Amino acid sequence: MSNTPYALEMRGITKRFPGVLANDNVNFTVEKGEIHALLGENGAGKSTLMNMVNGLYRADEGQILLDGKPVKFSSPRDAIDNGVGMVHQHFMLVPTQTVAENLILGQKTPRFYINYKKLEQDIADLSQKFGLAVEPHAKIWQLSVGEQQRVEILKMLYQGAKLLIMDEPTAVLTPQEVTDLFKTLREMTATGHTIIFISHKLDEVVAIADRVTVLRRGRVESTVDGKSTSKAELARLMVGREVLFRIQKKPAEPTADALVIDSVSCENDRGLPALRNMSLTVRSGEVVGIAGVAGNGQTELAQVITGLRQATSGKVTVQGQDVTNQPATATIDQGLAYIPADRNGVGSSPNLNLADNLILKSYRRPPIGSGWRIDLGLVRSQAEQLIEQFDVKTPSVDLPARLLSGGNLQKLILAREISRQPKVVIAVYPVRGLDVGAIESIHQMLIDERDRGAGILLISEDLDELLSLSDRIVVLFEGQIVGEVPPEDERIDEIGLMMAGTKVEQSHAT
Amino acid sequence: MELAFLINIIGAGLRTGTPLLFATLGELITERAGVLNLGVEGMMLVGALTGFAVAHSTGNPWIGVLAAMLAGGAISLLHAFVSITLRGDQVVSGLALTFVGAGLTSVLGASYVQVRDVPRLPVLPLPFLYDIPLIGPSILWPLFGEKQNVIFFIGLLLVPAVWFWIERTRPGLQLRAIGEKPAAADAVGVNVGALRYFYVFVGGLFAGLAGASLSLAVTPLWIDEMTAGQGWIAVGLVIFAGWNPWRALMGAYIFGALRRLPLDLQAIAWLPFASNPILGVWLNMIPYLFTILALVFSSREAIRKRLGAPAALGIPYVRGERGA
């Protein structure tokens, strides 16, 4: 290690954005031929750090060395010319062009006329050589996500990249595609390439990385050996404290019925039956989890309860008040909180600032609004207080909501919903796509609401989440409840069977 | 009789459609790079007046054409600056460019309105067409006439050239990439901003050429607003052509013919409405109505996609912005 220079060395890197210190005196080294994972929560500064190696950003302070030589990149082109390629999370491919065209875009040759026959032959040879099968004349939009990623990797190799930065490469892949990707990465390190693997998923990092560097709030927390580390250690480094993979909660003390769904039917967007005579009761002070494969009526159920979809028959009541087919404002006034699956489209208004997003459900009533007037001073002070209380990381309440990371946006939505002291909370996939720290705090908020006396309806695909949070689990299949199971780990197979439509004798009556 | 009539109309399209073809090709190139420039009308007017004035003072129509192209290109840079550097709204900036062009030429061109002795672009004879057996004398001769203005041939050569540039060359590949997904081009080191400037400028050159070919060939004089909405028709034609140069060629000739159609229809005695002056006005509207319909129709995202609009058309590129 002493003689061979590092493939990449970053010394004292600092990068500031308006209001944010994204990287703070970061020292980071990557050895030749290793897979080095860069781990951290959303917003920890992983992508910013790597974008400086890639030439998209320039460091405010510090030095970057490639193979021991100091470099200064002013554009991604510079980086590529020096053998650094980045595979972005959102693929940088032109969908309407072919694989071959995407590979030569930005190349110096051919200079003018493109001989497509010869080009496609060259690329077929290259993809053969690296074992990355792609069709050179296929258009990008025709390819699966996994194939598109292969094109991205191939593009970097075609341009002569020796150091490959992968920005959360597995986020969009199926488990099978992840296995293939890992195999490809291993083959690449065998041929002398070096890989930096940006991730916030602990399982993957433990599975693939030779070494792991953990970033937290823009600083390097630690660099550990990938083979000897554990998920728990990494999580602790990443979040800065012990992480509870299973939330601590006391037994539920359910009281009166909070939400009653009585033989409700409704249709989906295409006019087909989505819910069929479905009945369910959620009591105050308990979490009822709804398990099921997506597309079995979960979305429609949440919409019918919150007044966003018409029920064709049946009745929905919140604490005895009939809210069936009432407008959404009526359900809001009845004390119904809704955490929708789509944070950007339904849960928030991306271009409004955080303060405005926080009053979306309270602007019609005093103290915020009176008549046509809105008390902007109160809006602001209340927003600042909520952001503090719910730990939303932002430089200011004037920031447009679209600029928040997923976890912070979800905390903002919860802040809005929970601050109204709801009687019933409908949470749909509340932690999808979030990192461990955010998941933990959002789960804790939901449990706190339960203990305060709200009835929680949790819709999720993640069985671990359901088992951890729920006091009861019911399984939704083709618009009907097919069974109820207590949240015990041993019953997971039973839940799985019911999710697939197998009727199981109800073992626990409520 | 009917065949002669049809040939007559198409022939008229070939003679008057070329300025429209230049303007359409220019806008097509600009839009393929992802920039919408609604200022075609203004750039054409600037080109028409500059060409006319320079040709008149130098006595050489070709110097006039060159000056017209440079003037069109120069004024297009206003739009490039607003939409690329300042990332402003391209629709607003393009509209403003049209007003600037119309106003500027109206003031500066006032003294040229009476000028009649401008040197024109040459016409080339087509004697060989008559000698083609069978269809020569009966179809080709009446269709193309015994001679065509040189701009007709320039137009015919430009279409394959533009197609080849876009579809078969490396600069063309980059052109398509910055119009479809600028972030992807940027990530491999293509200078998106500089290239967009360049292609807005090229669009300006073409619009200037279109203007000069009006004032130095088709109707060799200068009158206020002499483009009479052809710049707008060009914007509609780009959509009609699905951003394809060959279909732009076809569209330009059809619209050239449509502009002549009311005159031709009036010559037909048995059409009752044709000689009616009020209905004649309605016939005159056809090309413009068609343009408005094309623009309204294509304003729907789904339809634009199906027609093949560049995905990043009208969207300023900001490096690193989410969703770019």
Image (cartoon, helix red, strand yellow):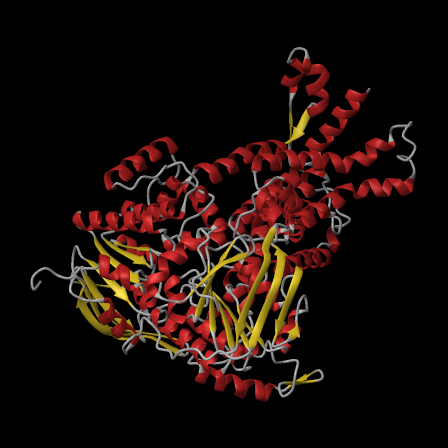
Q: How many marks?
A: 0
Q: Observer-nearest residue: B118 or B14?
A: B14
In which quadrant of the rendered view does residue A333 lie?
Answer: bottom right
Q: Picture coordinates of residue A280 (x, y %)?
A: 55, 66
Q: Observer-nearest residue: A173 or B189?
A: A173
Q: Quadrant of the N terminus of chain A?
A: bottom left
Q: Is residue A499 left or right of residue B243?
A: left
Q: Observer-nearest residue: A454 or A377?
A: A454
Residue A156 in view here? yes
Q: Is residue B90 left or right of residue A10?
A: right
From this view, report whether residue A153 is shown above or below residue A138: below
From this view, report whether residue A477 is shown above or below residue A135: below
Q: Picture coordinates of residue B261 (x, y %)?
A: 79, 34
Q: Residue at x 26, y 40 (%)?
A: A131
Q: Observer-nearest residue: B2 or B57?
A: B2
Residue A89 in view here? no
Q: Is residue A422 left or right of residue B191?
A: right
Q: Picture coordinates of residue A138 (x, y %)?
A: 41, 38
From this view, report whether residue A477 is shown above or below residue B264: below
In which quadrant of the rendered view does residue B99 lie?
Answer: bottom right
Q: Is residue B315 left or right of residue A167?
A: right
Q: Picture coordinates of residue B254 (x, y %)?
A: 70, 34
